Amino acid sequence: PRHKCGNQRSCPRDHFAFKLTSGAANVVGPSICFDDVMLMSSVKNNIGRGLNIALVNGSTGQLLKTGAFDMYSG
């Protein structure tokens, strides 16, 4: 069976499924999946160099904001 965000096991009903995937240098970008919705990825063109963060409402699962913090340039 397929589970949300491609995880190996399903989550309990009152929990959200998520999957964070790190990038590989400048070849493969990171991705953030939350409750079977891809929030950030190179395909969506909303990732950046450094730390990529998605702010999600913990009660509803609604995406509030995404951003990237470039740790290399300071």
Image (tube, grey):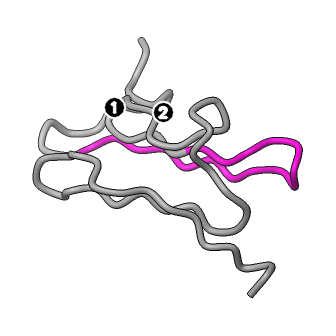
Residue drawn at the location 11% of the way across and 54% of the way down: 59
**Proximity of marks 2 and 1: CB atoms separated by less than 8 Å:** yes
Q: Is residue 18 left or right of residue 48?
A: left
**x, y percentage for residue 6?**
50, 27
User: Is 18 a magenta residue?
Assistant: yes
Which numbered disc covers residue 22? Answer: none
Q: Secondary structure at mark 2?
A: loop
Residue kind at label 2, given as amino acid type: Asn
Q: Residues within 10 Å of mark 2 (few under 14, many from 20)?
A: few
Q: Secondary structure at mark 1?
A: loop
How far apart are the alpha carbons under marks 2 and 1? Answer: 7 Å
- Nearest the viewer among 7 and 55 is 55
Image: 16 above or below 35:
below
**Quarter of the image where the N terminus is located:** top left
User: Is 24 a magenta residue?
Assistant: yes
Residue kind at label 1, given as amino acid type: Ser
| Residue at image mark 2 | 7
Principal secondary structure, stretch drawn in magenta: loop
Range of the magenta residues?
16-31
- Nearest the viewer among 29 and 67 is 67
Residue 50 position by quadrant = bottom right
**x, y percentage for residue 44?**
57, 33
Residue drawn at the location 35% of the way across and 57% of the way down: 65
**x, y percentage for residue 46?**
57, 45
| Residue at image mark 1 | 10
Q: Is residue 27 left or right of residue 72?
A: right
Residue drawn at the location 28% of the way across and 38% of the way down: 11
Q: Is residue 74 left or right of residue 33?
A: right
**x, y percentage for residue 49?**
73, 62
Residue drawn at the location 80% of the way across and 78% of the way down: 72
Image: 35 above or below 54:
above
